[in-house]
Image (spheres, grey):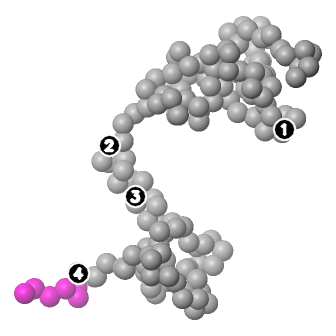
Amino acid sequence: MAEQDLVDVDPHDSGDGSLPVFRWKQAGRANLATRRQLRAMGLRPGGQDPVARIECRGGRRFAWLYRIDLAKPKLPMTLEKEAARDKAMAARQTCPGPCRRRYIHCIPIKTLGSCLECYDGTPADPATYFSPPVPASSQRAA
């Protein structure tokens, strides 16, 4: 790396109001991290605004940088959050067609409108879906 590529920037300087921009692999020494890096450390931004941004691929891609010392611990997964996530995934994985199967992957509802078996008859591997639940009206009391 050439000496001219290195930038000495104070990320806490509010000079003209613009955020400092780091190039690839320059922000590590400044106590800054992206959301994914914070997540890997068990942290979250915790309401703080980004203090800088890092650019790669000639500025075509960027990520916001947050101060690690102001980050807060991740919130634990609660039963309510887990139920909400499962409900959202069920909507993406359940075929609205006649089979009503829930697959282990997301099905192309926007493009095809159903699973491949309902769309064109391509048989689905039984290991990739769960059987639909039995309706309460068809269950008989013993």
Q: CA distance from mark 1 to mark 2?
A: 38 Å
Ranked by sequence position, the earlier of labels 1 and 4 is 1
Ranked by sequence position, the earlier of labels 2 and 4 is 2
Direction from residue 140 to residue 124 in the image, left or right: right
Q: Are marks 4 and 3 in contact (CB under 8 Å)?
A: no
Which kind of residue does numbered mark 2 sit on? Answer: Thr
Residue pointed to by mark 3 = 86
Q: Residue at x 58, y 89 (%)?
A: 122
Which kind of residue does numbered mark 3 sit on? Answer: Asp
| Foreground disc of the pair 1, 2 | 1
Which kind of residue does numbered mark 4 sit on? Answer: Ala
Which kind of residue does numbered mark 1 sit on? Answer: Arg
Q: Which segment did they paint magenta?
A: 136-142
How far across and down, in percent of the image, does residue 18 sit?
77, 18
Mark sitting on residue 136: 4
Q: Secondary structure at mark 2?
A: loop
Ranked by sequence position, the earlier of labels 4 and 3 is 3
The answer to whether residue 141 is magenta is yes
